[in-house]
Image (spheres, rainbow, N blue to C red):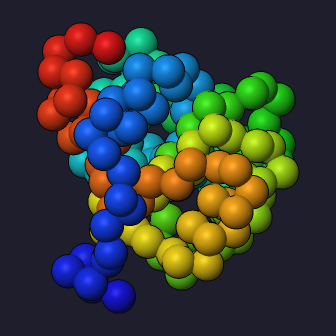
Amino acid sequence: MSVAHIPSDGLTDEEIKNILIKSKRIAVVGMSRDPQKPSNYVPRYLISKGYIVVPVNPSATEILGLKSYRSLLELDTVIDVVDVFRPSEEVLGVAEQALKIRPQVFWMQEGIYNEAAARLLSSNGVKVVWNRCMMREHMRLLGSGR
């Protein structure tokens, strides 16, 4: 599915702003060690804004000096947001794991959308955001503050 064919998540700026203000702990699924990739510089930006970032990457033990977990099921802390940097076709599996740890929000980064995952999560009370960059939304709605 091309980015142009991804439907809107229907969330208002106020709803996105509330997520960004209220969320403290963000598990980043697909976080990369490569500083050139969005899956590295977006979480780095979030850390600089005071968020607690928990890397989830099965092929890394540490990213940005933080312990990296193989999957969401290994996490030993409460997570507010699961932020996903995985191809759309892999998102349903991530959503199924997320359901077991009960985040308040499941956020699919820009260009990422999986309808089945969105339906599964929203029908279980998890707010779902898709096709949005957390860093870009933070800059747009909160500017330089938290």
91 vs 125, nearest the viewer = 125
123 vs 115, nearest the viewer = 123
Along the horizontal axis of the image, is 47 left or right of 63? left
Q: Give the residue displayed 32% in from the left and 75% down from the top.
A: 7
Q: Residue furthest bottom?
A: 1
Q: Give the residue displayed 31% in from the left and 34% down from the top.
A: 14
87 vs 107, nearest the viewer = 107
Measured from the top left, where is residue 100 in percent x and y? 84, 51
Q: Is residue 60 visible?
A: no
Along the horizontal axis of the image, is 53 left or right of 69? left
Q: Is residue 119 visible?
A: yes
User: Compared with residue 91, is residue 106 higher up or lower down, i.e. above or below?
Assistant: above
> Number of numbered discs present?
0
Q: Quadrant of residue 140?
A: top left
Quadrant, the N terminus: bottom left
User: Compared with residue 19, is residue 4 higher up or lower down, i.e. above or below?
Assistant: below
Quadrant, the C terminus: top left
Measured from the top left, where is residue 65 in percent x and y? 53, 23
Measured from the top left, where is residue 142 in percent x and y? 22, 22
Measured from the top left, where is residue 21 in percent x and y? 41, 20
Q: Give the residue displayed 70% in from the left and 50% down from the top.
A: 125
